Image (spheres, rainbow, N blue to C red):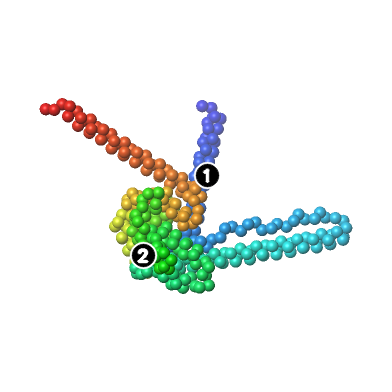
Amino acid sequence: MPRGQKSKLRAREKRRHNRAETQGLKSAQAATAEEKEITSSFSSPVCGDDTSSSPVADTLKAPPSVPATTSATAGVSCRRSDGGAKSHVKKSKNSSQASTSTESSAQDLLSKKTCNMVHFLLCKFKMNEPIKRGDMLKVVHKRYREQFPEILRKASERIDLVFGLELKELKPNGHSYTVVCKQDDTSGGSLSSAWPFPTKGILMPLLGVIYLYGNCASEKDIWNFLNNMGVYDGQSHFIFGEPRKLITHDLVKEKYLEYRQVRSSDPPRYEFLWGPRAKAETTKMKVLEFLCKINNTIPSAFPIHYEEALRDEEERARAIAATKAGTTSKASAHSRATSSQDSHPD
């Protein structure tokens, strides 16, 4: 091959290699951005993260500037008009920002009241005590009597989603309630509702963090996340008990999590992965849906992880279909063999 053609081929191959490297880097950056976006946004699955308000609409823009003129009077008029327009825009911005700030503060307060209600309901459940409407009103304060139905609705949704618990009224209009474990329901794509309390409350978020960190999360990342949930190493939690024992022993023993030393790490470092039981009882898609419900969004908002979850669903479907086909084939063969024996008795 002539030297010129070889040079062109080498140059073309180099460009292709550079494009592949750039594309790989962009994909990695996109995945990292998704990890940061989700892990930072669902800081507390127990209470949720309802404090984030929607982006503020674009502020009013100043009107087009008046064309310059040679007249001094026109120049003064222009400056006054421009100054008036700027003043108007500044006032509009301040008004918009003040309104947004007020709405955000109200939403923050409502979120805190909801969080307090969640903790109150969980404590009553752990102590197996009935719940009176009057006591719940005291939790949110009588000033927020009008917001009480919304606070109670959000708190009920939270304990249902995170813990699989249900708030039930004992008697119609009796103003007395109780919190019970929901009946196991594996239909309709439920989020592993069969997991007992409080396992689901900490396991689903942990599986989510592990998934978002590339299916393997360092112990440091896990504890950073748990700290955001109000769960600290060495401190007993009112729901989860001693957290280190729970995540490094109990859930590992039950095969929900795998806890292993990072290879060749000195001093030793550890990491978490999904255990075989978690892989069998839930899916990446269900965990992603859980995280998105916590954040009031949808899985497709995070395309990198959504595509991986879809591939996982397809692989599971193929494996199930292959297993069924194998079972059917064995059953047919057994049936034929039995029929053959019956038709040729000794």
Three-letter amino acid code at the position of disc 1: Thr
Q: Is residue 281 above or below residue 115?
A: above
Which residue has dot 1 on it? 22
Residue 338 shown left or right of residue 326 in the figure:
left
Q: Nearer the viewer, residue 139 or 61?
A: 139
Estimate the x, y position of residue 30 in percent, counting from the top left: 51, 49
> The residue tagged with tag 1: helix, strand or loop?
helix
- In the figure, residue 94 lies in which quadrant? bottom right
Q: Nearer the viewer, residue 174 or 28?
A: 174
Q: N-terminal of the two: label 2 or label 1?
A: 1
- Tell which tag, 2 or 1, sits nearer the viewer: 2
Mark 2 vs mark 1, CA separation in Å:
44 Å
Which residue has dot 2 on it? 240
Name the residue at 79% across, 61% down.
81
Name the residue at 41% across, 50% down.
286
Q: Quadrant of the C terminus?
A: top left
Residue 259 visible in the snapshot = no
